[in-house]
Image (cartoon, rainbow, N blue to C red):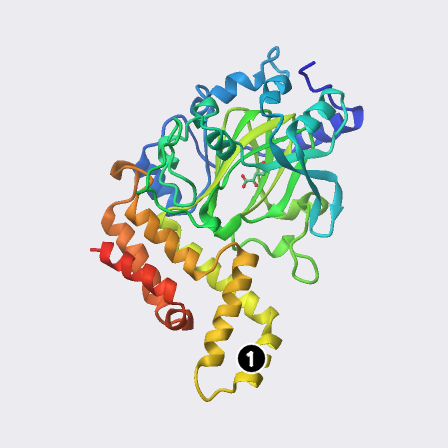
Amino acid sequence: MSNWSGVTANENDEILELLNHIPPRVFPTYDILTYNQFLENHLILNKPFLFSLAATSKWSASHKFRIPQAEGIASQPNLSALQSYANHIVPVANTLQQQFSEFERTERPLGEVLDLWETGEGRGLYVKDWHLMAEIESEGRGVEEIYEVPECLRDDWLNPPCTPHPRKTTSNDPKHSASTSDFRFTYLGPPLTYTPLHRDVYGSYSWSANIVGRKVWWLFPPDQLDRVKDEHGELVFDVRELEDEGGGIKVLQQEGEIIFVPSGWHHQVVNLDFCISINHNFFSSSTLPRIYDTLCLSQERVEEAILDVKEMIIERLGQQDDAWEKEWVEETQGLLERDAGWGWNGFWETIRNNLGHPPAPQQLSPPKYKVDEWIKEILQQFKLRREWVFLEDARNNIADIEAMLN
Ligand SMILES: O=C(O)CCC(=O)C(=O)O
């Protein structure tokens, strides 16, 4: 059996309720978008849009994983076709079991989850953040067996460059630090599985393509978060519990469409059908000032959380020279790497690698003078920080970067 066995009457009511309250779409939907339009109207202005289903109609995944039904009836996922990846160990969230500010999470072979779904079990299970593309490449094949990244989205400084065919590695390939290794994900889950309110890692953009099924998105621009915070200033988990759903901008993403989520925009997503989607978190040179600010904020939070450690270091080493400060900066970097996913060394290393090996050709990247401008802006700010004084690796990366700027 390859079909999902359908929704219960209650689930159906919930889905209809969601569908009945979708406002007209306020963001543009493009069949075609040139890189320059993308850069000017969306990357730099940091504004959402969607690509129409034309963007994914030729993807292998759209043919392999989708079983179309009669008009007006949602496509079915081809679970049997997914069985060819049954041995992949995938992260699974149980969206019926909230644990504090997360779902209960496990890791298990994909085949186990597919087997449950094929018998109508595992209703709340959501396979999230499955590194399908990296797995395929590690097995020596090319990601063309799934998709091809749309041209506009190839200037991606966070993921390995888009190469549909098996990736040939050479000794000249840039070294990807652990923090910049792979943010290309596949998600699959039954109707009503969902992703709670969040903002993407590092303050990156994301794009997300629906291979099978429809999703509802709630999007919140960075300055419109007041109504989604609780009395302690913490973000709520599920905006559906709030009056007027916290004032989010609601978008129904149809099967085949790709949505672009700007940097720093919080979002929540609910699957209306059995959904299979592919997404990338990414950023490019135009995002660097935002990514920089996000890392500064993460650093502030880390410092506040371990102020007692600072006092202990000062007590032990005294303040007659800067030994205490060196230790303090190193201490905060370690924690920052664990908490935010990277520290300043990883940040500057990523910029150096991408400048040295641009992921996209010139016509699909911002003009060089703009790239230099964005980098110089953050360099100037970083040189006023104490990390500039104490982090030798960051300084070395910056020396390499400066040699590549005009
Ligand atoms: O599809 C989902 O459940 C979440 C996707 C998401 O949060 C993203 O693409 O940034």
Q: Is mark 1 within 8 Å of ligand 1?
A: no
Asked whether, in this view, residue 145 is left or right of residue 35, the answer is right
* Whether residue 25 can be seen here: no
* Left or right: residue 17 compared with residue 385: right
Q: Would you call the spot at circle 1 few (<14 residues within 10 Å), some (14-19), or many (20 or more)?
A: some
In the image, residue 247 sits, relative to residue 337, either above or below, namely above
From the top left corner, tell me how far across and down residue 17 is, in percent.
71, 31
Above or below residue 327? Residue 350 is above
Q: Which residue is outermost to the right?
A: 9
Q: Is residue 153 visible?
A: yes
Q: As drawn, which residue projects farthest toward the left?
A: 406
Could you say which quadrant of the image residue 80 lies in? top right
Assign the N terminus to one quadrant of the image.
Answer: top right
- In the figure, residue 90 lies in which quadrant? top right
* Ligand 1 lies in quarter: top right
Residue 237 higher or lower than 114, as above or below: below
Identify which residue, 312 or 127, lies in the foreground. Answer: 312
Estimate the x, y position of residue 346 in percent, counting from the top left. 43, 56
Residue 163 rendering spot, x and y as whole percentages: 37, 31
Q: Quadrant of the C terminus?
A: bottom left
Judged left or right of residue 253, residue 326 is left
Q: In the rendering, at what x and y percent does residue 33 appear? A: 35, 31
Residue hosting label 1? 313
Tell me what residue is drawn at x 32 percent, y 32 percent: 34
Residue under the point 47% across and 60% down: 343
In the structure shown, which secondary structural element does the residue marked by tag 1 occupy?
Answer: helix
Q: How many marks?
A: 1
Farthest residue, direction bottom: 320
Which residue shows up at 44% across the image and 34% down it? 28
- Frontmost residue, 246 versus 291: 291
Q: Amino acid at mark 1?
A: Ile
User: Is 359 or 30 nearer to us in this picture?
Assistant: 359
